[in-house]
Amino acid sequence: MAAFFDMGGYAAFVWPAYGLAVIVMIGLALQSVADFRMQRKLARELEAGRSARPRAPMRNPDSEA
């Protein structure tokens, strides 16, 4: 079992890489949940007929920029 955790002498590189990957995956999951909740709230507000944020004016594609 100790040989597994030693990773053939590369444990100092392998375990931090695993740790970083886990931290990134947890961050992505938390960000996805937060975005889902925000989008669900926005959808409810739009369905209720009140916009959470003002609409941007439409631009005419034929006009010069």
Image: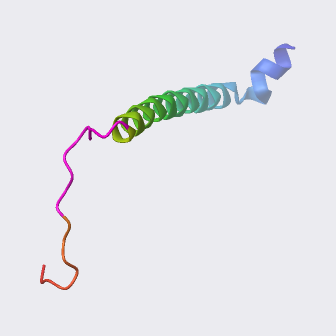
Q: Which of 7 and 55 is in front in this view?
A: 55
Quarter of the image where one finds residue 3: top right
In this rendering, the answer to whether 8 lies above or below 54 is above
The part of the chain drawn in magenta is: 48-57
Magenta stretch, main secondary structure, is loop
Looking at this view, name the residue that lies furthest to the top: 2
Looking at this view, name the residue that lies furthest to the left: 64
Residue 35 placed where, x, y %? 44, 35
15 vs 23, left or right, is right
Name the residue rendered at 26%, 37% in the picture.
52
In this rendering, the answer to whether 43 lies above or below 34 is below
Looking at this view, name the residue that lies furthest to the right: 1
Name the residue rendered at 19%, 46% in the picture.
54
Looking at this view, name the residue that lies furthest to the front: 49
Q: Which of 56 and 25 is in front in this view?
A: 56
Name the residue rendered at 41%, 39% in the picture.
43
Residue 29 placed where, x, y %? 55, 30
37 vs 4, left or right, is left
Residue 2 placed where, x, y %? 83, 14
Q: Quadrant of the N terminus?
A: top right
Number of numbered discs on residues: 0
In this rendering, the answer to whether 11 lies above or below 35 is above
In this rendering, the answer to whether 16 lies above or below 60 is above
Q: In which quarter of the image is the C terminus?
A: bottom left
Residue 31 placed where, x, y %? 46, 32
Q: Does the magenta stretch include residue 58?
A: no
43 vs 9, left or right, is left
Q: Which colour scheme is used?
A: rainbow
Name the residue rendered at 50%, 29% in the picture.
33
